[in-house]
Image (cartoon, rainbow, N blue to C red):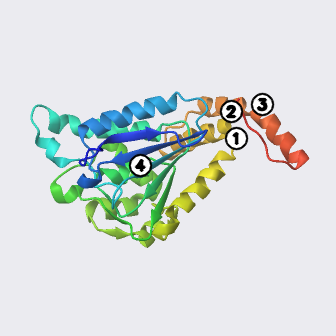
Amino acid sequence: MADAAGGPPRLEYPAEGRATITLARPAQLNRLHREDLHVLQAHCATLAARAQLRVVVLQAEGRLFCAGFNLDELGSGGSAAADDPQLFEHTVNALEALPVPTIARLHGGVYGGATDLALACDFRIGSNDLQLRMPAARIGLHYYPGGLRRYVSRLGLAAAKRLFLLAETVAADRLREIGYLDAVVAPPDLDAEVERVAQALLQGAPLALAGMKLSLNEVARGAADAAVLAERVQRCATSADLQEGLQALAAKRAPVFQGR
């Protein structure tokens, strides 16, 4: 029998080229424990080394996506208060750094640190009942640098200030307007929309997708290295994937990419 309290995030491979990470503490509104963050980092390391992977979906069980970090552990003794923010930041950075596209499947509510966890994904698909709130200012917490950077680079300074400083609860339609969500759908249509985006990504050339994902993120945070970007461009220019893509275009057929 499954533990009613849930457990650490699960990593599964539902189909070739695909992986899912599922937050699995629904009775606790999927609050993230220190254990969960370590497990998420381990999952990211596993996925980063999986050569045939093409897309990752981050999802959650229960009535909402995630209520953020388990704040009870901030005062759990020792150096927890000092260590937890860094642990969370490193975990979200590991998700962002995955060399394959990621999709966050969001429903119900996204609160606190979970807002950055989802923001680290490349695409965010939300149900129209979704609410988001970043309460850091209301509890006296100065958010960690990586999260601030993601907010500003993805949403802009004005939106980041509203979400962080006003700690407003924001509905799905507004989240779509400010660019936090890529799509808003009715709850029964959420899986279909996630699948649509996943299928579009699965049709892309893996080398080009991985290279452009990393390059776009580096450009967004002002950390792009011209030599590194040039190497990625050259790698794709001499790849078997490009030759296959050109041949498929000429033959008016679907390409079959091998990621090399």
Q: Quadrant of the N terminus?
A: top left
Of label 3 and label 2, which has the lower sequence position?
Answer: 3
Which residue is outermost to the front?
Answer: 1
Question: At x 23% / y 53%, what residue is drawn?
Answer: 28
Residue 14 disc label: none
Q: Are marks 4 and 2 in contact (CB under 8 Å)?
A: no
* Mark pair 3, 2: CA separation: 8 Å
Instruction: Identify the amino acid type marked 2.
Output: Gly
Of label 4 and label 2, which has the lower sequence position?
Answer: 4
Residue 49 seen in this snapshot: yes
Determine whether 66 is above or below 133 in the image: above
Q: Are marks 2 and 1 in contact (CB under 8 Å)?
A: yes
**Which residue lies under the disc numbered 1?**
205
Residue 259 disc label: 2
Which residue is outermost to the right?
Answer: 251
Q: Secondary structure at mark 3?
A: helix
Crowdedness near tag 2: few (<14), some (14–19) or many (≥20) residues, C-alpha within 10 Å: many
Crowdedness near tag 4: few (<14), some (14–19) or many (≥20) residues, C-alpha within 10 Å: many
Residue 150 disc label: 4
Crowdedness near tag 3: few (<14), some (14–19) or many (≥20) residues, C-alpha within 10 Å: some
Q: Secondary structure at mark 4?
A: helix
Crowdedness near tag 1: few (<14), some (14–19) or many (≥20) residues, C-alpha within 10 Å: many
Instruction: Identify the amino acid type marked 3.
Output: Ala
Instruction: Identify the amino acid type marked 1.
Output: Ala
